[in-house]
Amino acid sequence: MSNVFILADFLDGKPTKTNAELATAGARIGSVTAVVLAPVGKGEAQASSLATGPISQILIVESDYFSQNGVAAVADALAQLVTTKSPAALLVASHAFGKEVAARVAVRTDSGIITDAVDVSSDLTATQLVFGGSTTVHSKVSHGTPIITVRPNSINAELTPATPVVEKIELALDENSKKATITSSKPPVQGDRPQLTEANIVVSGGRGTNGDFSPVEAFADSMGAAVGASRAATDAGWYPHTHQVGQTGKSVSPQLYVACGISGAIQHRAGMQTSKTIVVINKDPEAPLFEIADFGVIGDLFAVLPKATEGVKAHKS
């Protein structure tokens, strides 16, 4: 049976739900091995936190170089494992860190790479949305170990309890992977809301907010949602750039995406149109985003969102 590697994904030392999504995709191809690259003394704890998803094995590599030297050290260890273990494929979360690691591993192992896939089939055919999301592409790696980065939230995760076999491996990292040292780092401020790329519900505001995101935030909080913003809103300084959704921001694929006061330029659509259900609130009936909406409300967000928030809270009570 084929063995598929996934790079275990952690945020501030805690596993993300992307692990179960990667494992679900990998299980279509064969047995799944999660690779945990952790600081010394923390590997077993991180491995034990991978409690859900069809993971049959966990490989732990511990080294303080992973935090000291970042991407280069992680890619070095992963490339060594790919070379020695010869997995059928390597699946990695498609965020900035994951894509940089995947690219370096592809170079080190002389392998093909596919980035930002929204699906992976049993024969390792990856589905991508390209040209701003206007075109669907199906592609396969033809050389080396297929390395595929998968967009978070794009695959429905199988959340069965996992009882994997755990193995600890010793690796000697190449000196070239230690040439750049991280002297300081500051984790992003998450607040009490879900992380944008992992949230099941995202409520985004755009130019129509006129800089006032309070009704957007209130509605998002009533739904337990993350808050996003269009490029127009972030460029105007109305909301942090870390929350920008779009081609030059973050790509999201939540179960529900609510766009408030966003016209729907192709730049924004590229980052959210794989959402399972799209609701658009805009007072302009000709707003392009209505073309891909599952549900639309023609109205002023300052009138619509407070009523919607009241309705959600009343339903909960």
Image: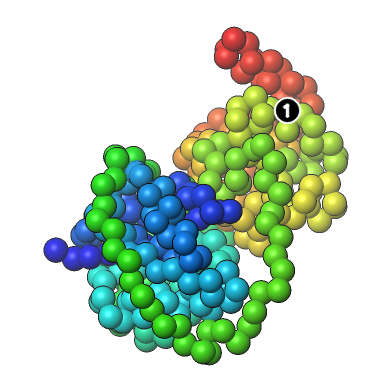
Q: How is the image coloured?
A: rainbow
Mark 1, secondary structure of its residue: helix
Residue at 34% over, 40% down: 159
Quadrant hosting residue 145? bottom left
**Which residue is at a point 66% across and 74% down the rendered structure image?**
182
Q: Position of residue 38 (x, y in %)?
A: 47, 64
Question: Residue tagged by mark 1?
Answer: 218
Q: Position of residue 212 (x, y in %)?
A: 84, 36
> Which quadrant does the C terminus fall into?
top right
**Position of 40 relative to 258 (above/below):** below
**In front here: 92 or 136?**
92
Image quadrant containing the N terminus: bottom left
Amino acid identity at mark 1: Ala
Q: Quadrant of residue 31?
A: bottom left
Percent position (x, y) of residue 39? Answer: 50, 65
Say which residue appears at 26% left-offset and 47% top-offset: 163
Callout 1 environment at 10 Å: few (<14), some (14 to 19), or many (20+)?
Answer: some
Residue 258's x, y, as percent? 62, 35
Instruction: Decide if residue 11 is on the left or right side of residue 263.
Output: left
What residue is rendered at 61% in x and 46% in y?
196
Q: Is residue 17 visible?
A: yes
